[in-house]
Image (tube, rainbow, N blue to C red):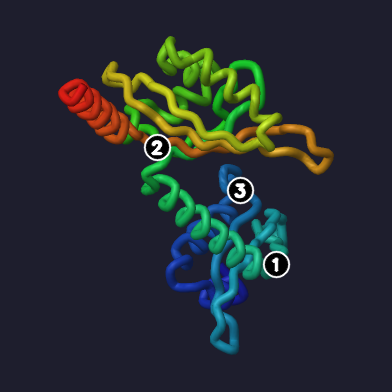
Amino acid sequence: MDMTSTDMIDQVHIDDREYAINRLKGRLAGDSDIPNTSSYRINTKNGEIKWIESYSKTITYQNKFADLALLMDVTEQKLAQEKLRESEERLKFLVSSNPAIIYTSKVAGDYGATFISDNVQKKWGYSSEDFINDSEFWLNKVHPDDREQVLKELSDLREKEGVGIYDYRFKLKDGTYHWMRDEVELLKDKDGNPIETIGSVIDITERKIAEQKLKESEEKYRHLYE
C-alpha cells in the first residue's frame, strides 16, 4: 500500500476505516468477490463529514495491481435517504400502535387487500401476508350473515361520494367473531376513475355488547309497565 493509499485511508471516518482498509487490500490482492462500488464517510479538511461513493477498477500499474477509483460526493443523497428511513420508521410506528387497522384494497371483485398494517397480527391473529397473498382471505372471514350486506355497501361506494361506514362480524384467528366498524373511502385518479379503496377498521365488540344489554334492559322494563 503506497503513501497515496495511506493518506486516503487516513481521511476515512474512523467508524468506516476498517471496512475501507479491508476492501482496498482485497482489491489490490485481486479478490474478484469485492464489488466495484462502495460508500463510506470521510473527514474533510474543514472538519466536515462527507459521504463518498467510490467506483473503482483494478488495473496493472508498474507491474503491480492498483485501484483506479472515481469518488463522488453523495452526502445529500445519503442524508435524504436517512430522513426517508426515519420518516418510514415513524409512520410504521404510528400505524402499528394505532388502535385501528389500516388497509387499502381493490375497488371491485373480491375487494382483496393490497396493503394492511402490521398491527393486524396483534389485533386479529393473522399476518399481513395472509391478506395480501390470498385476495379472498378478508371476505371469507366476514360472517356469512353479513357478507352480502358488506358487498352491497362496497359496491354502493360510488353512489355515496366514495365514503362509507359499515359494521360487520369478522372471524379472528382464535375462531371467535368480533364486531368491526369499517370506515372506507374510494380513491380516484385525476379523471375521476376509481383506483383503490383505503380504510380503517376498529373492534366495536364491547360497544355492541353494551348496546345489546341496554336494549334488553329497556325491553324488560317496558314489559313491566305494560
- Furthest toward the left, the residue is 224
Position of residue 222 relative to residue 100, above or below, is above
**Residue sitting at x 37%, y 26%:** 126
Residue type at tag 2: Ile
Q: Which of the two marks, 3 or 1, is nearer to us in this view?
A: 1
Q: Position of residue 120 (x, y in %)?
A: 39, 34
Residue 169's x, y, as percent? 39, 22
Say how many tags the image has. Answer: 3
210 displayed left or right of 128: left
Give the distance between the C-alpha atoms of the residues marked 2 and 3, in whole angstroms. 49 Å
Mark 1–mark 2 contact, CB under 8 Å?
no
Q: Quadrant of residue 187?
A: top right
Q: Quadrant of the C terminus?
A: top left
Q: Which mark is residue 80?
A: none
Q: Which residue is mark 1?
A: 72
Q: Assess disc 3: are there few (<14), some (14-19) or many (≥20) residues with their C-alpha within 10 Å of its C-alpha.
A: few
Name the residue rendered at 35%, 32% in the picture. Answer: 121
Q: Secondary structure at mark 3?
A: loop
